[in-house]
Amino acid sequence: GKLSDSPITLRTLSKIDNKANININVLTTLRTPRVKKLMSGGATFEAAVTQSQKEVLKAFNIEKDNNDNSFDQCNIAQKGEDNAILLAISSIMQYGKNEAELSEFIAKVSSDIENDGTLDSQSLKTNITNSASSIDNKVQENLRQRFEALGMTDVSIPDFYGYLDSDGDGVLNYKKPYVNCPTDYIYLRKGELTYTLKWAANCTPKVVLPEG
């Protein structure tokens, strides 16, 4: 993608106790209004963060057994499942949007989730589905080149494609027994049962084992 021509405001509501760094990103921005809503209803900060993070991920068809890791510790320049999820959702949110459109979309999604913890708008869901199915396999290389241009060479861009739904069927790539072209990638997750892989004759798939 191209460089941003104007600023994009991202937010977080975080505790800094015992944390060396606080990272502000798309995920912290999406959870912040929901955290405030839950706390206004009597939830502790910790409980509000845990619940809001689960609800934000659910809006992107992502379910994790462990939601203890805070979004403000995620880093797209490092390997790891949480970092891969951040990169996947950031790519979905940004796809095909200029700065103003991205800011508006983030605001709409976070506002929709704020009240009841679910994403109810069909238009927002459709946008997410269409964006996830349109992302190509160049994101990691583009990011790597950008980091290098900034003089940052000690980076490890996480494999995030498994956390996309490339064919729009509501199932993440790493859960599929096969993925159709044009993605040309087969996504498996560590610890899953053995799959029977199949693909069209004109495909040359690459097997990708996501983080986690």
Image (cartoon, grey):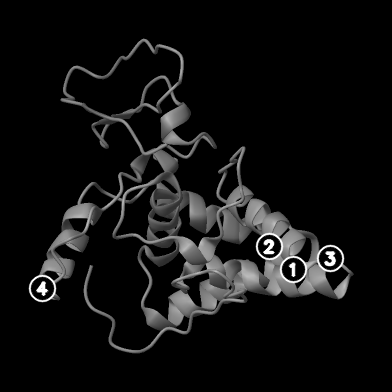
Which structural element holds mark 2? helix
Amino acid residing under circle 1: Phe
Furthest-front residue in this view: 18
Q: Position of residue 45 (x, y in %)?
A: 74, 68
Nearer the observer, 112 or 50: 50
Confirm or deny contact between disc 3 and disc 1 (CB under 8 A).
Answer: yes
The residue that appears at 38% across and 61% down in the rendered structure is 75
Q: Say if residue 164 shows up in the picture.
A: no
Which structural element holds mark 3? loop
To which quarter of the image does residue 31 belong?
bottom right
Amino acid residing under circle 4: Ala
Q: Position of residue 100 (x, y in %)?
A: 43, 83
CA separation, marks 3 and 4? 44 Å
Q: Earlier in the sequence, mark 4 or mark 1?
A: 1
CA separation, marks 2 and 1? 6 Å
Confirm or deny contact between disc 3 and disc 2 (CB under 8 A).
Answer: no
Q: Which of marks 3 and 4 is nearer the N terminus?
A: 3
**Location of mark 2 (residue):** 49
Amino acid residing under circle 2: Val
**Location of mark 1 (residue):** 45
Nearer the observer, 33 or 196: 33
Confirm or deny contact between disc 3 and disc 4 (CB under 8 A).
Answer: no
CA separation, marks 4 and 2? 35 Å
